[in-house]
Amino acid sequence: MNKYLLNSIYRDIFALLAGGLFTLAFAPFNYSLLALVALTVLFATWQHCSPARALLRGYLFGLGSFGLGISWVYISVHDYGGAAVFGSVAITVLCVAFWAIFPAITAWLSVKLQGHKSIEPLTLPLIWVLVEYFRGDLLLNGFPWFVSSYSQLSTTLAGYVPLIGAYGSSFLLVLSASLAMHMLRNKPQRLLMAAIIGLIWSVGGLLKLTNWTDVIGKPIHTVLVQGNVTQDQKWRPENRLNTLLMYKKMTEENWGADVIVWPETAIPAYLSQVDEFFLQPLKQKALQHNTDLIVSLPTEGETENEIYNAVITLGKHTGMYRKNHLLPFGEYMPLQPLSGLVLKGLNIRMGDFTPGGDSQDLLKAGGYPFITTICYEDAFGDAGLYKLEDAAYLVNVTNDGWFGDSFEPHQHLQIARMRAIETGRYMLRATNTGATAVINPKGEIIALAPLFTTTTLKAEILPMGGITPYAQLGDGKVMLLLLATLLALLIYKYYKAQLFKAD
């Protein structure tokens, strides 16, 4: 084997290993700086190679990253989705293989658009984040797992989040890695590039000390209920009454709190089935004790085909929020009829919910309106910005029981922390099996319930007012700015090349 081919194979292996290393930067491992190391190694493998080889190395990176990071897909599909082992393995492999395409696209574009052998430091991170945004927010309703900046919530880069959000902060991380890679290869510019990296991270540290929102009232006493009803038992009719009585008992033990929150679909029945005999008496008790309840259950719509995943408030203020950003393949079926036929053939049961719509009124509890998100809606920054100026805190109800004792509950909690930082508000996060948590506006977990435990979590939060710069912009405007920068760079390089040819 000649020396060139052997060196190329080594670089392929490094790209694969860098993918696994990248995942270790995220929860539950939380080795944040490994993201910088992994990306630096990856970008080095893309230098001085053909677009096709870069495509392969980007794909290998994706296999390493998603192969380790979303291994929980198997648990969801097999243990709780009802699929056989073969079908579960097939779905998991397909998921990993599909999402690995996006680092490959980034690699191919980064090499192809340069028009020369060396990728310049600024172009690559712009392409990376634009592809990351397309994957995370647009394609198939979005899959924002392993957005780069989620690995940096404990570093100084988190200071940029209230300004430019998750994707803007990702750009700065990837830019740092791109500069680091060039710094190692370009001796004349090492000092300049090191200074830029140092400036980026130092300014982030100063920004992290800044408070973008203000306290607007007295503390709110809250209780989050974690029922810990396993997914395989939750919807069995014979367990329904015991589940209702358990949540009722745990709530009655905490009357007097300002707000009590139950997790997603804590009530395993439709609203019409439990409203009269269970919810209305519970509402009267809540009024007597001056407590507001936030509970979740499915509800039927006006037509036979309308089914919503909903949150309702019981107490002084009664209202309903219907989940709008649905989970593809879990709550609705994209790519029909193909996806339905495939999943039916693999004996995988999925839901068929209706989106609630963009313009819904804010719910109110504890004397203040709040932003509601259900399940993985908290993975999308823009989903929590509607009427944010009127909201004093955030509430997320979810059910990560679908994923068992895997990486997913930890990853999901890490994502939720990003929303608190972006909005400058406390988040109450009630989950069925964990991780139930209370998060402050800096993204710090101030209270956390143990996983797979039937318990309640008590904490005080402060109502917050004001708007962060990111909340005024949203992801769309941040991405338009990055796209415009990339186009300007490409146009400049094109005309520069034309002038060079003319000379």
Image (cartoon, grey):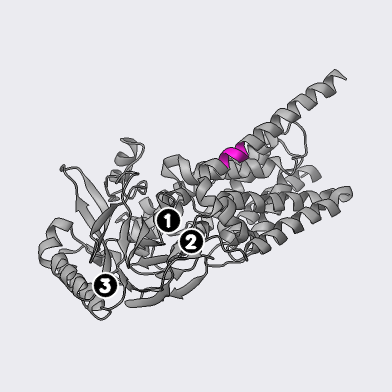
Q: Is residue 47 visible?
A: yes
Horizontal relation, residue 299 to residue 65: left or right: left
Q: Considering only order in the chain, which callout, 3 or 2, is on the residue closer to the N terminus?
A: 3
Residue 127 in the image: state x and y as whole percent: 63, 40
Tell which of 61 and 241 is nearer to you.
241
Label 1 SS: helix
Magenta residues (range): 479-483
Q: CA distance from mark 1 to mark 2?
A: 10 Å
Packing grade of label 2 (10 A; few <14, some 14-19, many >=20) is many
Check disc 2 and give the amino acid type.
Ala
Quick check: is 303 in the magenta stretch?
Answer: no
Which residue is labeled 3 in the image? 291
- Where 18 falls versus 499 (above or below)? below
Residue 352 in the image: state x and y as whole percent: 26, 46
Tell which of 205 and 139 is nearer to you.
205
Which residue is labeled 1 in the image? 378
Q: CA distance from mark 1 to mark 3?
A: 25 Å
- Where 491 falls versus 25 (above or below)? above
Identity of the residue furthest to the bottom in this view: 253
Q: Is residue 147 visible?
A: no
Packing grade of label 3 (10 A; few <14, some 14-19, many >=20) is many
Q: Main secondary structure of the magenta part?
A: helix
Residue for point 48% across, 61% down: 420
Which residue is labeled 2 in the image? 420
